[in-house]
Amino acid sequence: MKTINRILEKSFKELLFKGKALIIIGARQVGKTTFLENFNYGLDYLWLNADVNNVRERLTNPTLNDIKNIIGDYKVVIIDEIQRIENVGLLLKLMVDNFKDVQFIATGSSALEISDTIFEPMTGRQFLFHLYPFSLAEMYPKKSPFEIEQELPFHLVYGNYPEICTTRTLAETLLKNLSDQYLYKDVLIWKDIRKPELLDKLLKLLAYQMCSEVSINELANQLKVKSATVESYIDLLEKSFVVYRLKSYRTNHRREVTKKNKILFWDNGIRNAIIGNFNDLGNRNDQGQLFENFMISERIKMNAWKNSNVESYFWRDYNQKEVDYIELENNNLAAYEMKWNLNKRLRVSKAFTNLYPDAKTEIITPQNFVDFAFLKS
């Protein structure tokens, strides 16, 4: 299988041996382990898989002498799936503070436990990286924009998970397996959630409402549960890297009304697996949703990997006039409309441009999306 270089590699390499742990988080199966296995450290490394019982037990509340015996003379130590280790934040703190000539690297598949058990003890002692499913820039670095356009239909339906992209003939089967076997794993074990059927129903509702404003109260009424329950489940889905919220852009203009968020999926293939729809684009009525979700997610990935100081939003006013995607960077505003159907009116809402005449505006279509997705525009 051809190795696909990850954009993360450059910044990761620059921060090696700077006296801090390097922590890579991201959904299961996005390639964290493969990335670290293929990375050239220039030194032998020790690999500790916390999914293995005896490894996990040895790394739970060890003494300094225990740690010394574990790492031996290695100068690079990798701990895979750190969320499986009890008090792992204190463990990493002990390692970083007492073995200053050793580079400690860790991966985690869920921000659920990590946020509570690592970040506080590790304050000032780690560099954090988020690894996403493949981006178009990683998969097609040498192809022309026209060639990449030809690949778009596959990714709108099947997404960008590494195994899906490298084994296309099994894409549907692999996505169903990924969704069934891995999607809920971290969510269900967190706080011992006992109603996976509720989580499944919520995910389906979010999938059908993808790229639309979401009312927590309406979802709660449909599911016959409390609003607080829906809110907590969405929070869990965010922290397990399934979905994310896009907030509304609001200043002091009275015509800007919404306080609701849009829910988007990090991967189109996962979304389609949830609703069980892998039909070709020509046989679907959600092409616009798929295109919008994919483009915004690609843009956010690239902004994150390039360490851009960008805030992401959408916009809507009282009269239901909308802009799909807004970026704010250093007080500069840019507005983007995603248009799958080239026969529709191709312009950004006048309601928005009247309020923000200095904002940059652009229409993103299946024929010009490459610069937008690669951040070349």
Image (cartoon, rainbow, N blue to C red):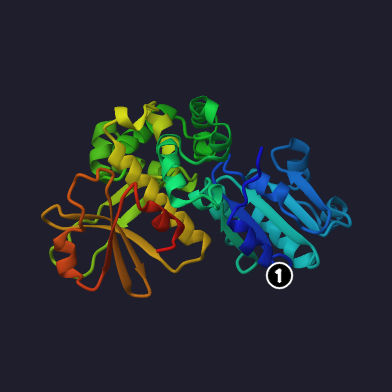
Q: Residue furthest left?
A: 319
297 or 25: nearer the eye? 297
> Is 32 on the left-hand or right-hand side of 275?
right
The structure residue drawn at horizontal position 84% and vertical position 50%, both measured from the top left corner, is 70
**Camera-nearest residue between 73 and 161:** 161
Residue 211, position as x, y percentages in the image:
30, 45
Residue at coordinates 69% horizontally, 50% vertically from top-left?
36
User: Does the rendering let one see residue 308?
Assistant: yes
Location of residue 18 by image quarter: bottom right
The C terminus lies in which quarter of the figure? bottom left
Q: Secondary structure at mark 1?
A: loop
Residue 360's place in the image compared with 170, above or below, is below
Give the residue number, with chain letter if any, for mark 1.
18
In the image: residue 362, left or right of residue 295:
left
Residue 292 position, x and y percent, is 33, 47
Quadrant where the N terminus lies?
A: top right
Q: Position of residue 154 (x, y in %)?
A: 44, 36
Q: Is residue 264 left or right of residue 343?
A: right
Image location of residue 325, percent across then percent down: 30, 56
Local packing at callout 1 (Cα closer than 10 Å; few below 14, some 14-19, many 20+) is some
Amino acid of disc 1: Lys
What residue appears at the point 40 percent right and 37 percent down from the top-left corner?
Answer: 153
Residue 91 in sight: no
Q: Nearer the viewer, residue 278 or 347?
A: 347
